[in-house]
Image (cartoon, helix red, strand yellow):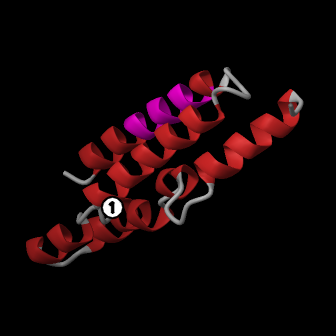
Amino acid sequence: MCDWIQCIQICASGLCANENSLGQRLSDWLTNLKKHVLAPRARTQDQMNNWFQGTYYNLGERYTDLTKILFVVFVYSALFPAAFFFGAAILLAQYYVSVFLRFSSI
């Protein structure tokens, strides 16, 4: 049986190691630059509407992330029961980031 630090590292590496991570979704500086700097300087309404396009949102990738997190939590729950809490925290954070990105792209 592993100690709790190793279990946290295993769970974190399995839960957060994806190509479209939570930090990348939160730090979308290019969209903020487009909306707050370039859009007010647009010459026509069509150009301004193009600057206000949101980030790419793929529901399939989000669903895959959700099932991957649940799978890792259930696999490692016998060794590390606190993985349920970490998994719930990660899912909650992903939910709020998804809501933020969805409403910021409108």
Residue with the most extreme left position: 45
Q: Quadrant of the N terminus?
A: top right
Q: Is residue 49 above or below residue 94?
A: below
Q: Amino acid at mark 1?
A: Lys
Magenta span: chief secondary structure: helix
| Part of the protein shown in magenta | 86-96
**Residue toward you, 30 or 77:** 77
Residue 89 part of the magenta segment: yes
Residue beneath the point at 48% across and 48% down = 68
Identify the residue at horizontal 39%, vertical 64% (top origin).
31
**Closer to the camera in the image, 99 or 67:** 67
The residue to which callout 1 is attached is 35
Q: Foreground residue, 77 or 19?
A: 77
Q: Work out whether residue 18 or residue 21 is closer to the camera in this orientation and state it.
A: 18
In percent of the image, x 47 and y 60: which residue is there?
28
In percent of width and height, residue 63 lies at: 33, 50
**Which quadrant of the view contains residue 30?**
bottom left
